[in-house]
Amino acid sequence: MVYSDNGFFDEFGGKYVAEVLRRPLDELETAFKEAMQDKVFLEELKTIQRDYIGRETPLLHAETASRILGGAQIYIKLEGLANTGAHKINNAIGQCLLAKRMGKKRIIAETGAGQHGVATAAACAKLGLDCTIYMGEVDVRRQQPNVSSMEMYGAKVKSVTSGSRTLKDAVNEAMRDWAANPDTTHYCLGSALGPAPFPDIVREFQSVIGREVKRQAEERNLDIVALIACCGGGSNSIGFFAPFIEEKTPRLIAVEAGGIGPGQGENASRMTGNASRNGILQGYKSRFLLDDDGQTLPTRSISAGLDYCGIGPQLAALGKKGRIEFTSALDKEVLDAIKFFAKNEGVLFAMESAHAGVEAIKLAPALPKDKAIIINMSGRGDKDIFITCPVFRPEEWKQFLLSELKRLEENKDIHNAESMK
Ligand SMILES: *Cc1c(COP(=O)(O)O)cnc(C)c1O
């Protein structure tokens, strides 16, 4: 079960959308299937993956970490070295190239924490496409560095003021825009979820991660016991796992946000949590965190990228079947894993990716030294300094922010800010 069966992965998936969105989704599906058979398109994709994204990304042997843990050899797929700092660019570039092939001039996307917005804005800048990013007003306020990046790449960021003014409202607004402008516009959805054909499209563009890992592991004769990835919507994990799904081994382990604990509203564990239910939301059937009335529950995680109430339908199906094992990591374990890999390997994990690191630290010691486990480091941690620094160095960070504020207010050292606008 790699491709969906007419949009479904067992009972999950589908295309539960308003009538106006059926035609754009059907056209997208046809165009995607044609493109994936087109040698010229695939060649173009490969070239831009190499020259712009920086593929292939390395597979690093974490020798010191493995020695300290005393068991299996840990390898880290360094997706964080991709241009813009995470795996999201693989999907953004793929979809923007597909949109261009379809003759679309304009791209819209939703974003929560801003990572998908940044990747899409960058891809549009590279490919000469007009770009509008929908982002909840609350997120715009808390994610200013990403909003600045999107604007630097030339995107228009539209602040969404309806509903809870966060990710789910941004998705609704993007769907509305697409329904009104299907001929000129492509909706570049950011994870392996949403109505069909998005889960198939996003997995295919992300499966470059898994194909590279497979080749890199074979070249080194690795005996892989497990692949471990963090899981928000599921795009980095399903892309990493894709070439291995039909095989019996290795174990495929997806790590959800355990937040601060197992209580309602304390985590974003859609597969392992106790508020996990089947539901149909935003165009697809899957597992969601819902209350007894079927309303979405608040979620919580230290990492914005995993803080979402739904999960891709293929992951839900493979989880139910047992091919993908789900587990979760707590915020405090995540912070420890970030320190462990930074200090021992010189690799700074994004908070999302460090969820996979936590599981590797738990798993490795019990396994023989001649076995391998591979972590997908979906992104690098530079983006997280506003969360990690206040935890690791609270007083120094506070002093730094105060002095920055003072500098701004005194208008010192701001080089020609007016002329640069
Ligand atoms: C967005 C994000 C994730 C979570 O999204 P998936 O679709 O589950 O991959 C994970 N890691 C990083 C670095 C992200 O930016």
Image (cartoon, helix red, strand yellow):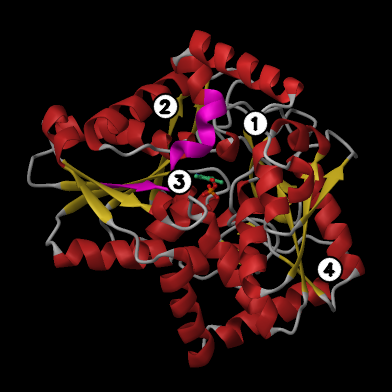
| Lower position in the chain sequence, tag 3 or tag 2 | 2
| Lower position in the chain sequence, tag 3 or tag 4 | 4
Q: Find the distance from the CA under tag 4 to the CA under tag 1.
A: 50 Å
Contact flag, marks 3 and 2 (Cβ < 8 Å) = no
Mark 4 vs mark 1: in front: 1
The residue that disc 1 covers is: 413
Q: Find the distance from the CA under tag 4 to the CA under tag 2.
A: 39 Å
As displayed, is residue 277 above or below residue 2? above
For the record, the magenta segment spans 374-387
Q: Mark number for residue 21? A: 4
Mark 3 vs mark 4: in front: 3
Dot 3: what SS?
Answer: loop
Question: How dense is the environment of label 1, judged by Cα within 10 Å: few (below 14), some, or many (20 and up)?
Answer: few
On the question of residue 265 being in view, the answer is no
Q: Judge: label 4 CB < 8 Å from ligand 1.
A: no
Q: Judge: label 3 CB < 8 Å from ligand 1.
A: yes
